[in-house]
Amino acid sequence: IFMFDPETGLTVASYEGPEGAPCGLAYGGGSLWLVDEGADTIYEMVPADGTILNYYKAPHGRCLGLAHDGTYLWVSDRDQDELYAVRPADGRVLFLVKTPGGYPHDLAFGRGAIWLADFETKLAYELALEGDTPYRVTNEVVRDFRFRHALRNDGDGVITEATINVAVPHESLENQKLLGDISWSREPDEFATDRWGQTCAVFRYRDVPPHAAVEGGYAVRARLGELHYAFFPENLKGLDAIPGDIRQTFTAPTSRLQMDREEIRTTAKEIVGDETNPYWMARRIFDWVNDRLEYKRVGGWDVPTTLIKRGTGSCSEYAFLYIALCRSVGLPARYEASVVVRGDDASFDDVYHRWCEVYLPGIGWMPVSY
């Protein structure tokens, strides 16, 4: 690593890098920052002599560019074509964005923007630190969806009454837009909304004979995209800025969440500590659950206290524990679930997936998945 006088080009000082493949350099907060491609590591060093003050793993395996904007580090990854906003103190990634070119290389900060050089396009890009919205939607596709929920009577008797509830797709979400009316397999008997605000089409059947089947479902065209959140936590308002109806509904206790148990309340308080920023409260809980549990499907949907003792859980159980801890400290959180469509070919995931959403003031509902 060479320190040189830009006016004369003369070397003022030099010293060995901490590893064998030093790439990006940046200066900020009184420190020199270096990303080493071979070691997949970011180093904080004393500029004068290279003494290592701190180090941690880079966000990914081919990080080449590095910049410091006065608060955060920005790191570019060549393989993933991604740009990461990183907290300098501990290397935690706040968010990532896709880069405009296919081979992001060097980074710099200046005039309030991040500057990125791309080896593939041979272009330099000026990137704004923040956009007009706290999220980006990329890789949008238009697809025709057909959903069918079938009930088959495999017995020898008659099913006297049967009800099928089908969740109604949201007309407009950040990354989902319906492009036409929903076409139902038959007209639903009614539409009902649960206490969480989800509307369902209700199909009722009577006297289903042996070996017969009934169904409820729909077809619709929609535009879907990948959703990426990008915002700075320090710009969030406090918990008191959360709308009252959302706070009341989504911090409410349920029997499965065990929010009346002392172990849940105490654990949540210990995790959050004196943190008052909603993002970092949610992030501390996320990291704690991620570090505490090992993914394992052992059958059943066990309650949060069981997971804390056992240390394992499925995606559903991760969600229960995360929601319980968030609600215990006043963060609205809710449960989400879905089947999965993989790539261009529609396929069925018979295990399904469950995740959470946490409400951040000024941002709205943000997905949290393990």
Image (cartoon, rainbow, N blue to C red):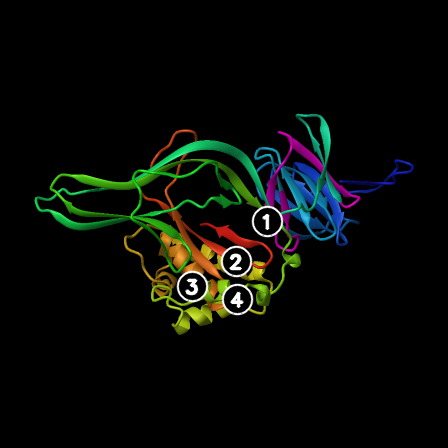
Q: Please name the residue that numbered disc 4 is placed on.
A: 244
Cα separation, mark 1 vs mark 2, equals 19 Å
Q: What's the residue type where badge 2 is placed?
A: Tyr
Give the label, 2 or 3, closer to the camera. Answer: 2
The kind of secondary structure element at disc 2 is strand
Cα separation, mark 3 vs mark 4, equals 19 Å
Nearest to N terminus: mark 1 or mark 2:
1
Nearest to N terminus: mark 4 or mark 2:
4
Cα separation, mark 1 vs mark 3, equals 24 Å
The kind of secondary structure element at disc 4 is helix
Q: Please name the residue that numbered disc 3 is placed on.
A: 324
Q: Is residue 353 left or right of residue 132?
A: left
293 in the magenta segment: no
Q: What's the residue type where badge 3 is placed?
A: Ala
Quarter-wise, where is residue 154 in the image?
A: top left
Give the label, 4 or 1, closer to the camera. Answer: 4
Quarter-wise, where is residue 292 in the image?
A: bottom left
Q: Please name the residue that numbered disc 2 is placed on.
A: 359
Residue 239: x percent and y percent? 57, 66
Q: Nearer the viewer, residue 252 or 5?
A: 252
Asked if one can make out residue 295 in the rendered structure from this viewpoint, the answer is no
Q: Residues within 10 Å of mark 1 (few under 14, many from 20)?
A: some
Q: Is residue 186 left or right of residue 15?
A: left
Q: Please name the residue that numbered disc 1 is placed on.
A: 93
Q: Nearer the viewer, residue 143 or 46?
A: 143
Nearest to N terminus: mark 2 or mark 3:
3
Give the residues in magenta. Answer: 84-112
Asked if one can make out residue 306 in the rendered structure from this viewpoint, the answer is yes
- Compared with 26, 118 (above or below) is above
